[in-house]
Each structure stands twice: as structure tokens, then as C-alpha cells.
Image (cartoon, rainbow, N blue to C red):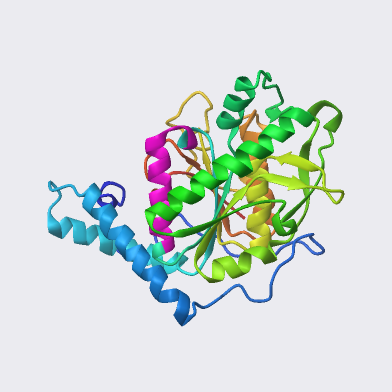
Amino acid sequence: MLAAKVLPLSSSNSLSSSKKYSHFVEPPPNHHHFTPNNLNFKLTATTKSPFITSCLKSSLSLLDSSHDSSIPPQLQVNIYSESLPFIQKFRGKTIVVKYGGAAMKSESLQSSVIRDLVLLSCVGLRIVFVHGGGPEINHWLTRLNIQPNFLNGLRVTDASTMEIVSMVLVGKVNKHLVSLINKAGATAVGLSGIDGRLFTAKPNPNSAQLGFVGDIATVDPSLLFPLINTNHIPVIASVAADEEGQSYNINADTAAGELAAALGAEKLILLTDVVGILEDKEDTGSLVKEIDIKGVKRMVEEGKIAGGMIPKVNCCVRSIAQGVRTASIIDGRVPHSLLLEILTDQGAGTMITG
């Protein structure tokens, strides 16, 4: 059984000992995001029943395929009961998940992530899924005899590369993920940052070297609210266009963080190829389970956070400063790390708070 492998028992069902959830941080004045007056949508009678029926079928299938007969029935029931306070805490809240890295390359991990998303959606979380697709882009560039090129961790994107990036992310990876989510029992809708002007891009300051690599100028999430309201899972490729219609390759972590802020999300989760923030970069056992923004800045100054982790923590810090309650960098290589992060107080990486 899936849940039995990831939800530890504790001595109490109380959340008092939980590591999670800082107080709400107000967004800074005059920030560029659109924020609706009311995010607490209610299901309509016409959408609720089909959605629940689909979820029940999916959940039952999942339990049947994952059942471990060695786990006593009473223990199984206890484990389900232990997850209740966490489900109550997050039910009806928006969770933005950025997906990429090792969890995307491995079929088994991909299946695990998708099933976890569907499970969380079934119990009432409002999931928004943002993805990149670096390995797939590299594969197709190589097939077309275009050499992938990177500068400071960002893909150098000339006109030919940008064309391949759009084709792979929007046309292939995005629709594949939508299909997997639909197959698992939820209903997904595939989008890119171009659709509905979800993201408006601007050139990166280093555009002379990077080409069509963009930053996000504005976010307008109004297209997403009807989808979230009807229990669809938006699946968003990290491609955007500027006001002139020029397409840009957008870092998926950045896209997820800015979108989480615009949606007023409860939580941002980055699925990565590392265990989280480490006190000692050479010791994977030195995981920092929870840290606030001041602590992150101190670790950057001390050189404990460096390289590819800096853009990730900056993305998290920026989203929290704009109103997201917590942001977590978790290890996407760990099966069911999403469930560990959301449905237990153990977590699956590093949680950053305000």
C-alpha cells in the first residue's frame, strides 16, 4: 500500500509539533501580480460528482496495485488516520509544484509523482503543476545536430534552439504529462506561459550571451481560476512571450515561484535533484530541515549555498516575500516525496519560511 510506506506514525494527531507553516507574509506594495479578491472557490453540483467518482476509481486502483499484504490492517488504518490533520490543513489551498530533474527522467519516479499529484487533488488540494524539460530538450537538440550550450546554469537559446524548446516543452512534454494525469484519474489541462498572457516575458539582463532566455515581467493568472474552480490541474510549460510576441525560454523554478505568488498559494514546492539545503555541501546528512529567509541569506553569504542552489533559494525567497506561506526544496529522487512533504511533519527536504 502506497501510504503505508511514506506516512510515519506519531504519538499524537496534533499539528503542534509540526515543522510546517509560518504566518502569512503580506506582498510588497505595488507588486506586479494580479491577485483576485477571493480565492476560496466552491465546487458546483455539476462538477463535484464526476470529479469525486474519478478520484475514487483512481484511488482504489492505486491501493489495489500498491497493496502490501505484510502490513497489518490496523496499521494501515492508523496511517490513514495520521494523515487527516494534514489533509485538513491543506484542503482547499493552492499548492504550486515545479517538476523537473531526475523525477522527470525516471519513468518510475514520474509515475510516483503523477499518482501523488492525483491523490492530493482527490483529497481537496488545488494543484498547479509547472514543468521544465531539460533532458528532453537536450535529446532533441542532439538528434537535430544542435549542440546544447549553457552559461551559468542557463541554456543559451538562439533562434533555432528556441524553436526546439517550444516544440519539446509545449508540444511533447506538456501533453505527455497531461495524458499521464488524466490516465491516473484526475483531469489536467496543458498550457504554456504564452496562453492567456499567463506570463509576459522580458529579456534576461545577459541576453547578449544567452539569447532568448527571458525573465518574467508580469503574471496574469486569471485564466487559471476557472480551471482550479472546476478541479482541473493546470500543467504549465515554462515558455513565455514578450509584448511583441517573441518567445522566450523561462527558468521553470522562476516561473513556478512567480506564479505561486500571483495565485496567493499556500505552498511552493520545487522537486530537485538534491536532498535540500545542506549545512555542509559535502555531507548529505547535514540537511537543514527548516530555515527562514534571514537564515538563507546568511548561508549564501557564508558560501554554504552556492552554484545551482542560489537561483532555487532566490526563487523561494522572492515567492515568500510576495505572500506565499512556505516554500520547500525537496528531493524528487525519493519516491512519494510530495506526500512526505505535505502529509507528514517529517518533510522531504528543506522548508523555507518568512
Q: Is 118 contained in the magenta span?
A: yes
Q: Quadrant of the C terminus?
A: bottom right
Q: On screen, 191 above or below 298? A: below
Residue 199, given in percent of the width and then of the height, sits at 73, 53
Q: On screen, 145 above or below 231? A: above
Specify whether residue 342 is in view: no
Residue occupying the point 79% across, 59% down: 32
What's drawn in magenta, residue-wise? 104-121
Residue 161 lies in what quarter of the image? top right
Residue 309, given in percent of the width and then of the height, sits at 61, 34
Residue occupying the point 31% across, 65% down: 56
Q: Is 100 contained in the magenta span?
A: no
Residue 174, given in percent of the width and then of the height, sits at 56, 45
Main SS, magenta residues:
helix
Residue 238, given in percent of the width and then of the height, sits at 66, 44
Left or right of 349 in this view: 55: left
Specify whether residue 353 is in view: yes
- Choose between 252 and 45: the one closer to the eye: 45
Q: Residue furthest bottom?
A: 45
Residue occupying the point 69% across, 44% down: 239
Please tell me how many numbered marks the rendered image carries: 0
Left or right of 345 in this view: 324: right
